[in-house]
Image (cartoon, rainbow, N blue to C red):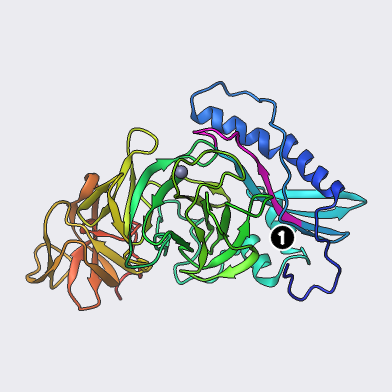
Amino acid sequence: MLVAGIPVPVHAATPADLAAAVAAHLRDGPLRTEQWHAEQRQGGPARSVAAPDPDVVVAARSTDEHGFGSVVVRAPEAAGAYPTGWLFVARREAGAWRVAVEGEPTFAELSAGSEILHEEERRVLAGAGGRSEAGPLSTNPSDRRTGMRLPWATGQSWRYTGGPHPMSGGVRSSVDFAGGDGRVLAVRGGLAYTMCGSGRGWIRVVHDRGLATDYYHLQGNISADGKAVKEGDFLGNIGNDVSCGGSSTGAHVHFSLRRNNAYVPIDRYNFGKWVISASGADYSGSAWHGSRRVGVGGTLHNHGVLGFTQGVVDTDGGTVLNRRSGPGAGHPVVGTVLDGTTVTVECSARGTRHVGRSGYSSDLWNKLTDGSWVSDVFLWTGTGDPVNGLCP
Ligand SMILES: [Zn+2]
């Protein structure tokens, strides 16, 4: 256990009274809410239901005054069942533990003031968003830029074994991958945590910009309690671990996206320059790289991170895109760029309006670093807004 700069004794195991307080907190609030939301999404009755008994796990650290760790509600070991897990932070006030879990407003407040967290944790978990050239995501829900690769070595191709499906909470936050050398790597830098009490199977990495990623079913995973990881750092191997429940019928990684402390639909987010696309049923779907579509069962080549000021040329079924001398179709063609190419945007301006994939319509044009211009509807950036500001 590493708790940098903390001159107080840290307990190796969670004290029973802290574990009990965390369990009670979940039963009374977040768990009930989660359950309620899950029912809502599945069209069930909007009512409060008896919360399952939380299995308070803990990859935790605590002192007499402070507690921190993960808490997981185990799922049955059955197909279609998924565990739910949160990081929690606790502080003893007037003799009683005050507890907050990810997603609650008080989580940020308690995290910011917790001396049991290291400096980077206080910053990231308190929702400061971290340093990023792209700024926080939370203010703009249509900004889907991730700055993330696929969760394996750049340059390798893995099988896309499962399209968007849930982790917990009902939203299709997750996709499955297998193959290659089986080594699962962090998609972006952040702080890593083991979620299951066993220390096996499930890693969460909390990134900047309000995003986090989960990796489940791992075997031989790292032991992590706030460990700083960089993009591409080893997290574990694909496997069949079900330490927190659920099922796995072949070694794979179940990869999930979280935003602002909750699972979000992974549809239309980009990893390794592939845009994940959901379709009718859980586990089906595809991924797009420019106009190239790969369905579930196909292989995805990890192209690495798409930068926050970059885009992938998507001609919506064509092979090349015209580059023009100015921001509009009336400007002369000065060259072309191939579908699927990564380009970097210098700045943007308004010009002629066009319509691209899925009816996306915009009058935004992007000036590339070579001085030529392309319409934003033929460039997948992850947002409809200028990615590098308006041109002066
Ligand atoms: Zn899965």
Residue placed furthest toward the left: 332
**230 or 332, which is in the foreground?**
230
Amino acid residing under circle 1: Ser
The image position of residue 361, as x and y in percent, is 23, 50
The image position of residue 192, as x and y in percent, is 59, 62
Establish whether ligand 1 lies closer than 8 Å to the Cβ of label 1.
Answer: no
* Residue name at image x 37 percent, y 43 percent: 163
Decide: is 310 above or below 163: below
The magenta span reads 68-81
**73 or 352, which is in the foreground?**
73
Decide: is 93 above or below 187: above
* Residue name at image x 67 percent, y 33 percent: 32
Residue placed furthest toward the right: 95
Decide: is 327 above or below 86: below
Q: Is residue 172 left or right of residue 235?
A: left
**261 or 14, which is in the foreground?**
14
